[in-house]
Each structure stands twice: as C-alpha cells, then as structure tokens.
Amino acid sequence: MAVAEQAPPHRDQGVAAESAALTPGSPPIPLPPQLTPRQPLLYAVLSFSAGILLGTRVWRPATWWAVALVVFLAAGGYLVRRRPSWSFALACGALVLLGAFVIQGRGPPAVNTEILRFADGSEVTLTAHVTRDGVRREGGFGGDRQVLEVESEQLKTAAAQEEIRAGLRLTIYSRAQSPTTAKSASTPLYTYGQRLRLTAKLRPPHNFGNPGAFDYRGYLAQRGIAALGSANQAGVQVLPGFSGNRSAEWRNRLRRSVLAQIHALWPPAPAALMDAMVIGEDAFIDRDTRVNFQRSGTYHILVVSGMNLGILAFVVFWVLRRLRIGDLWASVATALLGFGYAYLCDWGAPIVRSALMLLLYLVTRLFYRDRAPVNAVAGAALGILILDPRALLEPSFQLTFLSVLAIAGIGVPILERTSQPYRRALRLLDATAYDLSFAPRRAQFRLDLRMIAGRLSRFLGMRAAGLLLPKCLGFLLGVYEVMLISALMQISLALPMAWYFHRATTLALPANALAIPLTEILMPASALAVALAYVSLSLARLPALIAGLALHGITGTIHVVGHLRLADLRVATPSLETAVVAGLSLVLALAVARRRRWLAVSGLSALLASALWITLVPPRPRLRPGTMEVTAIDVGQGDSTLLVSPQGKTLLIDAGGPFGPWRSEFDYGEDVVSPYLWQRGIARLDAVAVTHGHSDHLGGVPGVLANFRPRELWLGPNPQTRALEGVLAMARGQNVALVRLRGGNDFAFGGVQVRVLSPPRGWQPAVQPRNNDSLVLRFAYGGTAFLLEGDAESKMEPAVAAQQPQAALLKVAHNGSASSTSPALLAAVRPEFAVISVGARNPFRHPRPEVLNRLQMHRIATYRTDQSGAVTFYLDGAKVTPAPLPR
C-alpha cells in the first residue's frame, strides 16, 4: 500500500515522505507497515469499570480490597520484565480491585435525611434559599405552579424549631383570582440565592414498587434532594440577603441572560427548542416533542450533548486556524470554549464528559497522536470514573462513552479504508505529480476525474468544472460518512437503548442523515446570533434567520419520521445472555476494526446481527407455566392488574392514571406499567380490559395500547367521554378487536374461565363515569379463583354476592374505600388472600381502617402495593402462593 494511505508513525517521517512524493520524478519513500496501535487506556477503563460493577454487587471490607490490590501490584511489578503478558494481566486485575475499592469507599450519595422527620404531610414554616432557579408550569385549579430546588436553613412547627440543612424540591402553586389574573404576577420566578420563608407540607420521595421502575428517589439523591414539598404562593415571603456560591450566581445570571436573548430572537415555540439545543434548558419542551425526537433516534440533538459541543469546537478551531493562529493556542482556546460551554450548561454530566474528551483529544493531537482516538476516549472515561465511579451506572454516561468509542474505534477505521483515501485523492486535482503518492486505484481515480472535468469544461468552462466536480464528489462522500456514522451509532447503541428506553430507533439513519447536517448549521448560527444580540438585535437577525430555517428543517424531519408507525418500535428488556453476546460483539468489532478486511467485516457483521436480534426477536417472557398468575402492579392511587393464564396468555386489567385537577405530562401507561411489562420480557399483550372510565383506571391505557398492540380490548357499559373516545379511536387504528362485556358473560381465556358478575344486563351509564360502572370479573382455574371488583361499591355487592363468587384471592375494590368490601361480600367470597392497590400517603386515607378491620376479622392475609410494591399470586388450581411474603 502506498505511503499516503498510511498514518506516518512520526510527524517528521510523514513530512519527509510527503515532500518526496511531491517532488517530480521521485518515487514515494516506502515505510514499514504500521502496526495496530496499542490501546492500553481502553483495557484500563474496561478493567476499572468491571471493578465498579463487581463492587456494586459483592461487598467486602475495605482492607480486603486494599490487601488484594497491593498483592496484585507487587506481583505485576515483579513480573514486568520476566513475564510481560502476566504482568499486564495482573495490572488489569489490580484496576478491577481498585474499581471495587473506590465504589465501595465512596458509598451512596450523602444526603441529609434529618428533614424526613418533618415529612409527614403536616404544615411547617420553612426558611430556605434557592439552589436552582424556578420553572413555571401549568397547574390545576385554573392557576399555575412553579418548581424549584432549595436548601433548608430552619424548620419550625408548633412544637419545635430546628436548624437543618437539606435539599428540597418545592412546588409553589397559585390559584387564579379571576380570569384576567396574570400568571406572571401570581407566581414570580424565584432565582438562585434568594432566601424564602414559606409554609409548606413535606413528604418523602416515593418510588413505584415494581421491578424495572425508575429510581426517582435515587435520582433526587444524586441532586442532593431529600424531600419534596408543596406551598401556596400566598404564603411565600422573600427575605433580604443572598445565600449561595457567587460563581453559581454568575452562571445562573448568564443563563437567564442568554435565555432572554433567545426569546427575543425567536418566537416562543422555536425559542423553547433553541433553549434546549443551545444551553440545555428543556423545561418548556412538551412530551409529544420529546417522544418524536426519541422515536426518530435524534434525541441527542434536542438535548445538549457531545455532538453540540463537538460542532461548536470544530467551528471555533477551524476559524482560529484560518486566522493563522498556531495549533497550540487554537487548541487552548477550543478547550477553554469546551469548559466554558459546560459551565454555561450548568455542568451537566454529558457535556462535562464531552469537554473532558475534547481536552484529551486536543492534548493528544498536539503530541501527534491523532491515530489514537480510542485511547483519548478511554482516557477521558477513566478520568471521569476515578472522579465519580457511580457515573458508570448512569445511562447517559454509557450512551456517551459507547457512541464516541464506536465512532473512534470502528467508524474512523472504516472511513480510513473507504471514503478518506478518495477524499485525499480529490485534493490538488491539477497536480499530476501528486498522483505518485497514491495507490494505483486512487491514481486512476484522479486521472478519470481530470478526464471527466475536461469533458465538462466544454459546457462549464475549465475553472468551473475543476471546482464543481471535486465539490460534488466531496459532498457525496460527506453524505456517505454521515449515514455510515449514524448507522454505526444506532447498531452500537441498540443494547443500551433497548435496556434503558425500550426503543429500537428503526428510522434513525434517514432522520440523522437529514437532521445532523442541519444541526451543524444551527449550532454556530444560533451561537453567533446570541452573541451579536448583545451588540444589536438587527445584526443578529441574519444568523437568527439561518438558525431558524435549520431548526424548521430539523423539526419538519422529526415530525414526519416521528409519526410513522415503523418509528415507534418498542422492545422488551433483552435477556442477560443477549446482553452479554451484544457486548462481546462490540468488543470484537473494536478489536478487529484495523485488521484484515475480512476480519473487520466479520466484526461489523457480528455487531449488526446482535442489533437486529435485539430489535426484531422478542425475548422469552419470564412466566411460570401451568399456573394462573395475578400481579397487582404498583401504580399509586389507581389500579392495574396483570393476569397470565396457564397457557401463557396475557391480560392487563386497567393501567392506572392521574387523579385530581393537576395537569401533568407523566404517563402511567408509558412510565409505570410498560416498564414493568418490558422487564418481564412481555412484548405484546393478548388483551387489555378497562373496568370503568375513571382516570385512575383508564388514564394509562393509551400508552399501553401504543406499546403492546393487544389483540382485544374488553369494555363494559361506559359513558362516551372524550378520554374513552380517544382509547377507542386508538384501538380502531391498531385493528384491536373490541369485546363488549355484560353481566352473565362466561367464556374461556387461555385455560382460565372468565365470568362477568357486574354490571347487570341493561345497566345504563350516566353522563359521567361512576364507580358502579365497574366490571366485576371472576377468573377460575381448577379449584382456585380470583375476584376483581374494580371500584364497585356496596350498592352492587349484594347482586355479586348472590352469584356464588367464591374465590381464594380478592382484589379489594376502590383502593380500600369504606364504600366497598361489605361484610356480606366477604362472607360470600371467603378469600384466603386480599390485595389492595393504593397510593402511599394518599389524601383519601385509603385503605380505610374499617375495611382493614373487616379483612382481619375474616382472617384474610392482606397485601398492599403502597407497602409491598407489585404483589404477585400464583394459582395452580389447588392453592394460592403469594410473592413476596408479607413484610
């Protein structure tokens, strides 16, 4: 292979070779073939990461890890000259031990939980200072609300007063006094450093108790938040003085100033997107927009990520070099830009990691190590993990590291073998002496281009043809490179995307091929517009217009792609075996990317095959065959029950939902029920049943229909509300069979006999949904049965009791309300076990003490989702086995 297609092992040797190649008549100087560069930092970060994972699962005293570490280091030092390979293995082992030692030594985030003593829902007088600027949201009661983070200084109750420093997330709400009341006047935004005194009700953060549920409590702990609180705006008093860090105050002022300029340059809707893309302020992005970006595989564009920083860094470095500023000072300025941008973005974890990777890349570039990008990525990752080992457990770190690693370790070698030689061949096309520095195929390519340019010159002129042809071919090569890198990122990230987000971004390739080039225009244009806006809004109009047009192109692409059904492919959590194979395929592709062509193709094929397997082959559901399973899913103050028949058929009864006047983008079907089903390996449901039309039963159903495409939808008699009409429209669009149930229906479902006990035939629903609209269903398998009441009240229970509804397991009606579960019903059903789906610290004080007393009097073992989380019962035809056991 010719010299120009290989990276010179040293700058001086490369310069000499290039000079000789450009000398007329002189042949290229042959260089020895380049050995595959070693990547010691990659092995180091992989070993350290393995140690972190080991330390999170296996606890040992700190001295144990320390002694083992010393032994490994001593043995490695002794063998470093005698057995280098053994010494290398021992060094990797020492890093594993170091990772376990560091993660266990750090422990969980330190959060002051003293304040939880006051988090019982009673009122306290709180003195605190703002640690994160407030964000206004739309609220209930015709008013609005503001969410902010504070640090408490003093808490006062009727009985005590204490000085406590703890993090809190507060919701300050207001009620509109009249239709003309201005929201900005009712809820002034509170900013960093302000001191407040207010009356609040505190509560501890609560996780949904389902396997696969988001760890909300842990997320808040990472931010130093120990408790949640709510307060009325009317009782908030701003105190004199400032409390906080001056650097943070300057950053918040700068952020507010930049946001003001953005909203002065663009209308509200585009400005909200610019907020997110430019400085990471995504508070005003609605859920539908987020979902469309996620569906299309372009969510990294919406949030500030490494790509945003990379675009800005490239533009700044390119401009500085064109201004004839030396490599050193251009690199220093670009690195400072990276950390300044991270500072402006509130030191968000992804952007800080990207800034560190940028710094390491620039440093290695200065030392002429451009051919070691994998080491640069691995070195940055190792530095981050040493500072914060728990970052390894965060999806954002894994996605950032894997995407950059795949580009550097696989994408760059592919480009070096495919498009890059032809890109170099496009340079100095008129210099025939330069042909000698290329391999015969590329030299012939240059000859062919000159011949084509000669033909085109008859129509365009020699100068125009000589410029147009290389530019057009360069553009086509650029499109190829964007599509290749985009495709590589999607297949490399298939595992974490399926594991954490249960999405397969099937249309990410065309979406990114269109959106990324537009983002490369948007980022520098928007940055220039904001900078010029400080001088003159008139000067900023042109770059703002360019950025706006680029944004319009991006959102148009995302809107079209995001609404295609193929784009919304959801996948269940892959099995551990599949995850291991996918991880090994990525390692294989990295290991052979720079080796022989057939090896590189084999590694890439293995990576592609693993991604296709994760996307197209659903995992085997984790079910217990030959039994009827009933699981009460924890959806808070609502209902959702999974029933699995002995033959493996799946039925979801209700899907939870919100209650009360608050408007929220939280989707119980998407955010609570679906993760549990995916964690079980369930990719599709056989049927979904809706007991009645109240929001805490029906609200999550649209998300479930979208994600699991059931074959049937079971409904009783319900009023035709807007929410129900939306569910029916979605079901019709998915060709879901609608099954209308009435009292007296009796049918089989996967080996289970189903009987409808209520409402009776001829039941007429009212204008609005009522509890007594609820389907009451009895599921029998062998000698065991399960009775589900929905929210049916005591008015309906005598008719149910008269139908001999004996069942070993009872789903208690209406979250344990006193309006249901009468003594007559319990006497007729005679259950051994009961389960109550209820929200922790709910305002209705469910389950009511009288209901619990009735259950206790009948000696019924009772489970509650607010105490046990998701509770599963197995009915094998002879007995009922609960899991978990009562706490």
Image (spheres, helix red, strand yellow):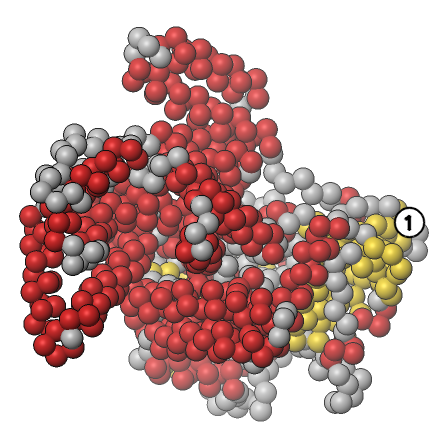
* Looking at the image, residue 183 lies above or below residue 105: below
The residue that label 1 is drawn on is 161
Residue 885 location, x and y as percent?
A: 54, 45
Q: Is residue 125 left or right of residue 532?
A: right
- Going by the numbered disc 1, the residue's amino acid type is Gln
* Residue 512 figure quarter: bottom left
Furthest-right residue in this view = 159
Q: Quadrant of the C terminus?
A: top right
Could one spot residue 719 in this view of the protein? yes
Looking at the picture, tell me which residue is in the foreground, 877 or 49.
49
* Residue at x-position 28% and y-position 47%: 412
**Residue at 60% across, 56% down:** 344
- 609 relative to 778, above or below: above
Residue 354 in the image: above or below residue 787: above
Q: Residue sitting at 56 percent across and 76 percent down?
A: 539
Q: Position of residue 858 (x, y in %)?
A: 63, 56
Residue 103: quadrant of the picture = top right
Q: Quadrant of the N terminus?
A: top left
The residue at 84%/67% (across/down) is 236
Q: Secondary structure under badge 1? A: strand
